Amino acid sequence: MSKLGNTPGSWRVPHDRIPPHLARILHPKVLKLAAKGLGPVGVARHLSAEYQLSVCPGTVRHWMVGDRKPGETTLVMNTFKWEPSPALSYIIGANKGDGCTMTKSGIVKLEVADREFAEAFNHSMATLFSRSTPNKVLVRRRLDRLPMYIVKYACRQLVRFLRQPLKKLLEFASAYPREFLRGFFDAEGHVSVGVGKEFHLVVGAENSSKPLLLQARRLLMSIGIGSRINRRREAGSIKAIRGVAFVMRRTSYGLVIGKLKDVRRFAREIDFSIPRKTEKLKEAILITDTHAAKDRPRAWTKLYRKERGEWVRKALR
C-alpha cells in the first residue's frame, strides 16, 4: 500500500479539504481511473485500497467533470441570462425527453446511451454558461448493458428554470424552434423504416405527455413540417430500446412525420445530433429518390439488417 508524501499512518481527508500537495498527486490518478470507465464511487474506493486515504466521492466527481480544480475549494459558478438562446432551446428540448433529470442539490444531469447526444448537450450547457471548456463526459459501464454517457452541471438557477410549467418554457424555446426540436428528437426521436411489399419511411417521437407532443407539432408546423399524433403503447406494456426491454409506466403517444416531403424538410431543417439516426434517415431518403418503388426494399436490406427489432447498419467491406 502506497503512502502519500510524509503523511504517517491512515489518512481521512474531510470533503473539500484535501491539502494541495496531496491533490496534485491524486488528480492525475483520478483522471486515469475515470478514463477506464470507473465512476466517482469506484475511483474513491480504488484510492482507498491503493493509498492510506479516504476521499469523498463528491470531490472525485468534481475533478472528473472538470468544474473544480485540484487544491481549490470553489466551484465554477454556472450562471446564465433568462433570455431566449439557441443553446437554451436545445437544453429545454432535451430536458423534455426522458434522459435529463434534476436533483434537489441543484444538479442537471443527462444520462444516455449515445455519446454524440451527450456531447451535443454538453456543448449547449457550456455555451449557455459562457464556458470556454465544457465539463467532461463521464462513462458508466456495465457488463450486461450498453455504456451510459453522463453529463452533469451544478446550477440551481437552471434547475429552477427547467421546473417551470411547460407553457412558460415554450415561450423561451419557441424563439429558436429548430434547436428545441433537435434537442427533443435527440432525446425521444427515431427513424422508422418498414420493408414489405412497399418501402415506408417515417420520423417520429414518443412521449407520455400528449400536451408536449401537441406543442412540438405546433412548432413543426411553424417551419412547414406536417405531422400527426397517435396513441402508441398502453401503460403496463413492454417496450424495447436497443434490445433492452422496459415496462411502460404510463400510456405513451407518438408524434409521426409521415409524408415524404415533410421527412425531407425535417432532415434539412432539424435533423439529429446522433450520427446513427442521421445516417439512417439520409440513406432511406436516398434510396427513395434513386430507386423504383419495387426495388427499394431490396436496396435497404443490402445496407441494413434487423437486430432485436431495430435496423442496424451492416459493416462496410
Image (spheres, helix red, strand yellow):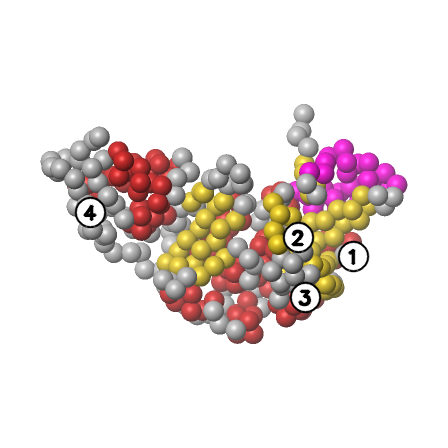
In the image, the segment drawn in magenta is 278-307
Whether residue 257 sits left or right of residue 180 in the image: it is right
Q: Is residue 15 left or right of residue 143?
A: left
x%, y% of residue 189? Answer: 64, 54
Q: Earlier in the sequence, mark 4 or mark 3?
A: 4
User: Which residue position is annotated with label 2?
Assistant: 238
Q: Is residue 300 magenta?
A: yes
- The residue beneath circle 4 is 13
For mark 3, does the 10 Å Cα neighbourhood hold few (<14), some (14 to 19), or many (20 or more) residues?
many
| Between marks 4 and 3 in the image, the one whose residue lies nearer the viewer | 4
Q: Which residue is mark 3?
A: 217
Q: Mark 1 and mark 3: span between their CA atoms?
A: 14 Å
Give the mark nearest the N terminus, 1 or 3: 3
Q: CA distance from mark 4 to mark 3?
A: 53 Å
Which quadrant is home to the N terminus?
top left
- Magenta part, dominant SS: helix
Quarter of the image for residue 181 reads bottom right
Give the residue drawn at x 71%, y 59%. 232
Q: Is residue 241 shown left or right of residue 232? A: left
Mark 4 residue element: loop
Decide which of tag 2 and tag 1 comes sooner along the chain.
2
Q: Are marks 2 and 3 in contact (CB under 8 Å)?
A: no
Front position among marks 2 and 3: 2
Residue 314 left/right relative to 195: left
- Nearest the eye: 247 or 103: 247
- Whether pointer 2 and pointer 4 mark residues with C-beta atoms closer than 8 Å, the reply is no
Q: Tell me the residue at 67%/56% (across/down).
A: 237
Q: Is residue 277 magenta?
A: no
CA gap between label 2 and label 3 equals 26 Å
